[in-house]
Image: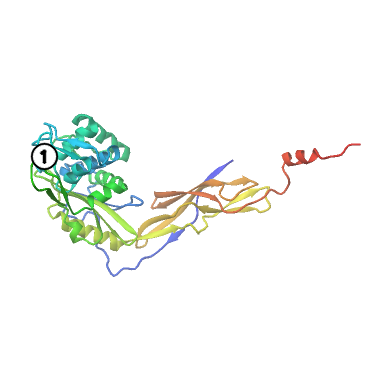
Amino acid sequence: MTTKRWAAGLFFALIFMYNYVGVLAQGETSAKAACVLEMETGRVLFEHNMHDRLPMASTTKVMTALLAIENGNPTDEVVCSPNAFGVPGTSIYLSEGETLTLEEMLLGLMLSSGNDAAVAIAEHIGGTLDGFVERMNARAREIGALNTHFANPHGLPDDTHVTTAYDLALIAREAMGNDAFRALVSTQRATIPWEGRTYDRVLKNKNRLLSDYPGATGVKTGYTSRAGRCLVFGARRGDMELVGVVLGCPDWFDEAARLMDACFESYDMVRVLGLTQSAGEVAVEGGKRESVGLCPLSELCVPLREGETAQLVLDVPQRVNAPVYPGMRMGEGHLVVGGEQYGSCELVAGARVDAKRLTLDVRRALSGFAISD
């Protein structure tokens, strides 16, 4: 069976008209580095120095929390070891030997940015601090964050502890695909036990966007004197969701809001191929019909801005032999914008095409009924 890869014309060519024009000039930001992605496709909608390696401060904890959620149970008992007790920087003031559930430790990690909670979680999940850091780096490589290197689970300064705005956006996008992580980083306030006290710890999320920016979804703040103000952020508006990063950004919340506003106003989420749409057809050899239509098993959508076009590129056989049955796998459709692929879907036959003649096996079966004299 010979396959072919061909572009199904300019499948979509939309010109969007806006009252708001020219806001999203690439590189116009107060951050040292920035990147904004669309969640579904991962398409970069804005970037500035997005591949520069920089310190990330407590935005490190996005990876710490993701690994903990993926490898632990919320009800696990996590003990504050001597290593975790008294870690410098932001803290939830764990006592040595104090025990909280993993869920409670994660709230302390992501709402109050507790460095002590980070070490306690790391030792619980990784066995040792070094073991957990190895897993952080391995998970980063799996995600495609190839310019990132973690040296610790909290983000305190280390010359080898670096990321890029693009890598951190990829990590955040992966994390926001996890429902438990998403619920955690959208929590604005929580209480957890405080051993030896008659009252609980009250945790307030440091991410001001959750209360100030409509549709905000998370995710994490970070600051050290070396890294400056760093922020991983996200929001949903209509059918588009964004996730973004600013590193070394003095007006972090305002700049994140400005970048998201600009992306939301400059792009529309466009359905290029819907479940009820035909994706083309394939020729059928020896069939009662000459071709069969192709149906997608999932939608293909992409954010497009004014004047952009999207193509549906088909990776399907040139022809198939009859019979063909509805739902038979025929290949894939790839969504391409500007030469970059932003999604794929499986394509199946949309109808039955019977063969013109009976198959040899059927003829042999019928021959068994022949009467000899």
| Residue 289 vertical placement versus 226 (above, below) | below
Q: Is residue 24 visible?
A: no
Q: Position of residue 242 (x, y in %)?
A: 28, 55
Callout 1 crowding tier (Cα within 10 Å): few <14, some 14–19, many ≥20:
many
Locate residue 89 relative to residue 312 in the image: left or right: left
In this orientation, which residue lies closer to the viewer: 211 or 60? 211
Instruction: Provide the residue designation for mark 1.
Output: 94
Q: Amino acid at mark 1?
A: Leu
| Residue 332 vertical placement versus 161 (above, below) | below
In this orientation, which residue lies closer to the viewer: 206 or 142? 206
Determine the image quadrant of residue 251. bottom left
In this orientation, which residue lies closer to the viewer: 15 or 102? 102
Residue extending furthest bottom?
Answer: 19
Q: Is residue 119 visible?
A: yes
| Residue 168 vertical placement versus 134 (above, below) | below
Q: Position of residue 278 (x, y in %)?
A: 52, 57
Q: Residue at x 76, y 41 (%)?
A: 363
Q: Position of residue 87 (x, y in %)?
A: 10, 37
Locate residue 254 relative to residue 352 in the image: left or right: left
| Residue 20 vertical placement versus 284 (above, below) | below
Quadrant for the N terminus, please: top right
Q: Residue at x 28, y 45 (%)?
A: 175
